[in-house]
Amino acid sequence: MDRRKFLKNSSLASSLFFVPSFVKAFEQVASESFGYKRLVIIQLSGGNDGLNTIIPYRNDLYYKERPTLGILKKDVIKINDEVGLHPSLTPLKSLYDQGNLTVINNVGYPNPNRSHFRSTDIWHTATDSNKYSQSGWIGRYLDNYAKQPYSAIEIDESLSLAMKGETMNAIATQDPKAFYNLSKDPYFKGIRSNQNNAHLSEHNLGYLYKTMIAAESSAKYIYQTSKTFTSKKEYPNNKFGNQLKTTASFINSGLDTKVFYGSLSGFDTHVNQLNTQKRLLNIYAKSIEAFVQDLKDNGTFNDTLILTFSEFGRRVKQNANVGTDHGTANNVFIIGNQLQKQGLYNNMSSLSDLDGNGDLKFEIDFRAIYATVLNKWLQVDDKKVLSKSFKQLSFI
């Protein structure tokens, strides 16, 4: 089996590409749990328009800058006398009223980058905007604290940079049964008989062959554990809804996984934003509603925290195509039943005091949110993962 054939036939490789130093550690997989709390991360990919998500409906400047794009006051789901939710987020109003939602406004980072790819990398790696990293913040969490790759799972076919560490990667899978069946494919069984051959050197991916063999036990564990639970909750029939349904089955089955990662794409709304954002926020809200209820029904919501972010917000002023262009600061949603500060965590940014590009000024570094989640929720040393200290917030 040469390199070309291996890569051509191995769709498993993208999910299980661990670096060589991990192989020996994997062969001695530990069964003990390292904590019971779970974190679910959701990315709204493309740059969701935060100003039409959390809406300052009493601010005349909002409607002045968005004469045809602003959400009409009569349609806003009001949460107080000044601020309301996009009408598609009605399910989140229930979470808000129950104390299960915190909205953190004006989240960003110094010297922002408006490229989708670069800003996403910055959020994934938790580095300064002028620095680059090959490892993500969850990947480094795994490096320091996990004993097995399924300690973090991305519900997708490929792995985001956030989930890649220096010595350990998370696992990417959308279907645990298909993942398990793939690991039993005769092609990979054939690798086992060749694993001791001299030609399987690190240069020609010998280490990757070994990793594929070792990862078979991970696929087996995920499948055999998750199949013990079948959700009775009806989810929206779309890709994102299915992601959350799979995540709920993993959580409710007792899978020893600490972090789950999912995403909803399509938020790059330069043109005709109203209908696109309405549809996407509706998918998000209804799927989250089903997910939270599924966890509540099975007694796992108390120990689950959901973090939703987008790589940047949009400009305050609408463009000529009834859309919005790339901006900077945005809002972050925190959903859970252990929130210390519920509702609006902080005030919205001023619409009369924008930066030089017409963007909202950021107030809270997104890494302070990560640091708080690592320290207070996952109960690990945030500085060890993020390489520097950030001010702890008080939402949990």
Image: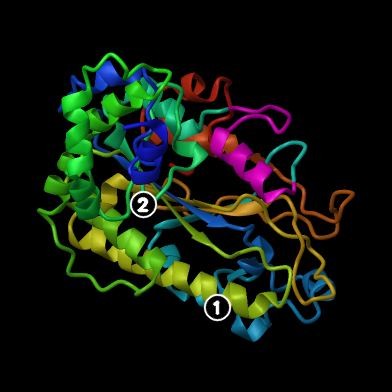
Residue 393 on image: x %, y %: 53, 37
| 208 relative position to 221: left or right | right
| Identity of the residue drawn at 39% across and 52% down | 156
| Identity of the residue drawn at 22% across and 41% down | 187
Which image quadrant: the N terminus? top left
> What amino acid does circle 2 point to?
Ile
- Dot 1 corresponds to which residue? 87
Viewer-closest of 197 and 85: 197
The tag earlier along the polypeptide, 2 or 1, is 1
| Mark 1, secondary structure of its residue | helix
Q: Is residue 370 magenta?
A: no
> What amino acid does circle 1 point to?
Pro
Write down the quadrant of residue 216 in the picture: top left
Residue segment shown in magenta: 114-133
Q: Residues within 10 Å of mark 2 (few under 14, many from 20)?
A: many
Q: Is residue 123 magenta?
A: yes
Question: Can you tell which mark lies on residue 155?
Answer: 2
Residue 357 on image: x %, y %: 87, 52
| 164 relative position to 79: left or right | left
Q: Tell me, yes or no, if residue 164 can be seen here.
A: yes
Seen as rendered, the residue at the extreme bottom is 74
How far, Cα to Cα, is label 2 from label 1? Answer: 28 Å
| Identity of the residue drawn at 17% across and 50% down | 226
